[in-house]
Amino acid sequence: MTQTINKNKSAWHRHTWIAYLAVFIGVIGHASSEFVAKIISNNSTITGPEISVWRFFFGGIGLVIISLMIPSSRDLITPIKKNGMSLILFSLFGVASAYLFFHWSLDYATVPQVATVVTTIPIFVGLINLYANKVSIGVAKIISGLGAVFGVILLVTDGALLALSGDSSNLVGIFMAIMCAFFMSGYLVLIKPLIKEFGALRITAITLFLGGFILWIGVGLLFGRWVAFWNFSDLTFTVMVGIVVIILYNTTLTQWLWIGGLAAVPDITRGSYLFFFKPVVAAFLSVTFLGISLSIWQMFAILIICSAVVAEALISYYQEKKNIESI
């Protein structure tokens, strides 16, 4: 019996490999965002919370513009009319809160630490998906999850050792990164029905733009630092380039690919496990371009996480192969 393909569906819904590729490209964009953020903060007085405002206010605008350019995605009013309160909550917690913690954590912890701790996202995705959608967590996913947890424990231990030496800021940054992972995971799982109904581009554009606006108000009220967008030309060339890159590449492009790809893959928990490669990319960039040296704990944590991802892929492959042979 020949399987028919619905051509009205987007490419990443028709072809699973495109969805996984989109997720992987999104992960690379997410991994390099710490690197770009550090370049901005190291060459200016712009803090982590302010970077989050620049990134999502204009990154969201970029997605809105792209959405308006594509006929099938131009109607941004209908999703707001039908699910306005839900979209505001997703923007508040899944975008504004998550990325405020993310960029703020970089003011306290190192790039490899934040990148590795945020890889707890697949664990939270699996747990939230289990609770909200009653999707069970298989053996392969449990093994990968335990590997990631152990990697995070190594990083927290590394932070604790630094705290004993008189610098407890690493633990503060690690806690913020965990909060980022929690809020972001809830967003990725719970927003999937809206993306299925209205499309990834529209929902991502709406939530990122609203999240950016909430961040601008929140950072101004909480930190007393109102981001003056009109002073962009006063920044150094390096900082201007960094802001443009983090807006267009790390947000407008790769956030759409990451969120949309995860909504399109058949198994969102498995798709999110590609996020475990994030610390490897971030560590490579920080060592190569920022001159940051990795501790033994951090290298060991990254090795464990990569091994866990490979184990999950191999176990899943042999399980599927065994199931096919038994038919």
Image: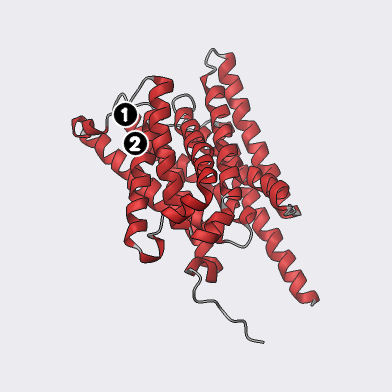
Residue 72 seen in the figure: yes
The residue drawn where x is 64% and y is 53% is: 269
- Side (left or right) of 99 relative to 192: left
The residue singled out by tag 1 in the image is 227
Q: Residue furthest left?
A: 233
Does the residue at mark 1 contact the one at mark 2 (Cβ under 8 Å)?
yes
Distance of label 1 from label 2 (alpha carbons): 8 Å
The residue drawn where x is 57% and y is 54% is: 192
Residue 290 seen in the figure: no
Q: Position of residue 168 (x, y in %)?
A: 55, 17
Mark drawn on residue 54? 2
Q: Secondary structure at mark 2?
A: helix
The colour mode here is secondary structure
- Side (left or right) of 34 relative to 162: left
* Residue type beneath disc 2: Trp
Quarter occupied by the C terminus: bottom right
Q: Residue furthest bottom?
A: 1
Q: How many numbered discs, if any? A: 2
The residue drawn where x is 60% and y is 38% is: 182
* 10 Å crowding of disc 2: few (<14), some (14-19), many (20+): many
The quarter of the picture where residue 162 lies is: top right
Q: Please say if 45 is above or below 73.
A: above
The quarter of the picture where residue 69 lies is: bottom left
Q: Residue furthest right?
A: 326
Q: Please say if 326 is above or below 105.
A: below
Among numbered discs 1 and 2, the one appearing first in the sequence = 2
Q: Position of residue 117 (x, y in %)?
A: 57, 36
Q: Position of residue 45 (x, y in %)?
A: 31, 23
Q: Position of residue 206 (x, y in %)?
A: 43, 48
* Residue type beneath disc 1: Val
